[in-house]
Amino acid sequence: MSPAELLPRVLAAETRAIARAMRMVDDRLPGGLDLLKGLFPHTGKAWILGVTGNPGAGKSTLVDQLIAGFRAKGLRVGVVAVDPTSPYTGGAILGDRIRMARHATDDGVFIRSLATRGHLGGLSHSARDVVRVLDAAGFDVVLVETVGVGQDELEITRTAHTTLVVMAPGMGDEVQAIKAGILECADVFAVNKADRDGADATVRDLELMIALGNESIRALSRTRGHATHTARDAHVAGDGGGDRDGRWTPPIVTCVATRGEGVGGLVDALERHRAWVVGTEAGRARRKARLAEEVREGLREALIDAAVHDLGARIDEALAAVEARRVDPYTATEDLVRAFRGGAS
Ligand SMILES: Nc1nc2c(ncn2[C@@H]2O[C@H](COP(=O)(O)OP(=O)(O)O)[C@@H](O)[C@H]2O)c(=O)[nH]1
Ligand SMILES: [Mg+2]
């Protein structure tokens, strides 16, 4: 099916067309880019909700509960699982998670797992594009589950409007979170497995870390050699919500995902953040910054490709000259840019 034929069917939310469109963009098949171009004007309506945290924290169990929570409000829900261990597969759920199968027959729910095998252009590109297919198909909420480790996963959380960080007591998750830099991504914290010992201590640790403020967290992450997020607003301590300066304080919600306890409160906290993103200047600026970043990133890649293509062997010659110390790297770069621009004009 051509992109032109597929487009109206995706917009009409035909399940098979959505699945096909996702494969097309995920595998970078011919026509995938044309399809994305056609879909883009129909995107921007969905609420993209990232769910991240260590393996075993209870993300998938919580996502399952969130699906039910949003469905109860009449919202259509898409799920993209980037965590390869998550028990979702193409709208059905594998293994012993039979309770999740309740969503498999609901056409207001679409679940898709992204394989983590070699993605051209990176996993974050694929996740973003697959989310866009769901957005265009009219899903009101798109949940994106990722494991909170690695740069790719952090990139993915940056494309979300709201990021939920799931933690479990007694797993050292707080320390892990700082190391991985996910603390700064958090808009809402869920301390899951509150039926176990130590949940209160985890909440207290988190409160303390939030109170320490973004700057100290950033400093800590830097000294540990991890990337930090600069586009984020500073966090301030409190019980969650936006303050007069337009800053957002991440609330901490305790829950027991396996029993659905605390899920209502979690949905409320997430919706409060959504309202903040939509309704405040700071929130809107954040969305704008994401798109600007995407265009810049695309431009960077396209320019490098074009330069490599046009300059060809001249790049290798320049490298050899620098290696032989005949030319300094600054001059070599300037010369290559000049040659590229000369060819382009
Ligand atoms: N005791 C307890 N176990 C939970 C809770 N939530 C999830 N689990 C269990 O923790 C394990 C990992 O859950 P899963 O949702 O797959 O975690 P994920 O790796 O973060 O997606 C599963 O065996 C769940 O049944 C909870 O609130 N309490
Ligand atoms: Mg999972």
Image: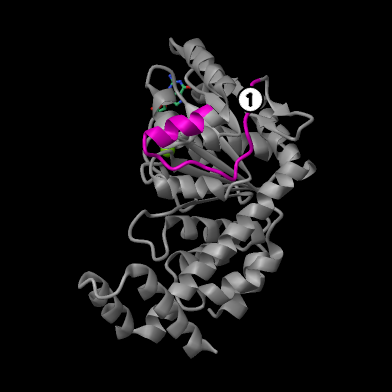
Q: How is the image coloured?
A: one colour
Q: Is residue 257 above or below residue 281?
A: above
Residue 35 lies in quadrant: bottom right
Pick the quarter of the image with the C terminus. Answer: bottom right
Residue that badge 1 annotates? 251
| Mark 1 beta carbon near ligand 1 (under 8 Å) | no
Q: Is residue 332 above or below residue 258?
A: below
Which segment did they paint magenta? Answer: 216-237
> Within the magenta stretch, is there residue 19?
no
- The percent position of residue 59, horizontal first and vertical second, equals 47, 34
Picture mark count = 1
Q: Would you call the spot at circle 1 few (<14 residues within 10 Å), some (14-19), or many (20 or more)?
A: many
Question: In screen coordinates, is 131 left or right of 176?
Answer: right
Q: Is residue 14 above or below residue 145?
A: below
- Overall secondary structure of the magenta stretch? loop
- The percent position of residue 6, horizontal first and vertical second, equals 59, 74
Q: Is residue 241 visible?
A: yes
Q: Which residue is found at the position 20% from the left and 73% from the top?
A: 324
Secondary structure state at the residue bearing disc 1 = loop
Q: Which residue is found at the position 66% from the left and 47% from the top?
A: 286
Q: Nearer the viewer, residue 213 or 21?
A: 213
Where in the image, quadrant-wise, is ligand 1 located? Answer: top left
- The percent position of residue 79, horizontal first and vertical second, equals 54, 47
Residue 128 lies in quadrant: bottom right
**Residue lying at the far left of the rendered structure:** 324
Kind of residue at badge 1:
Pro
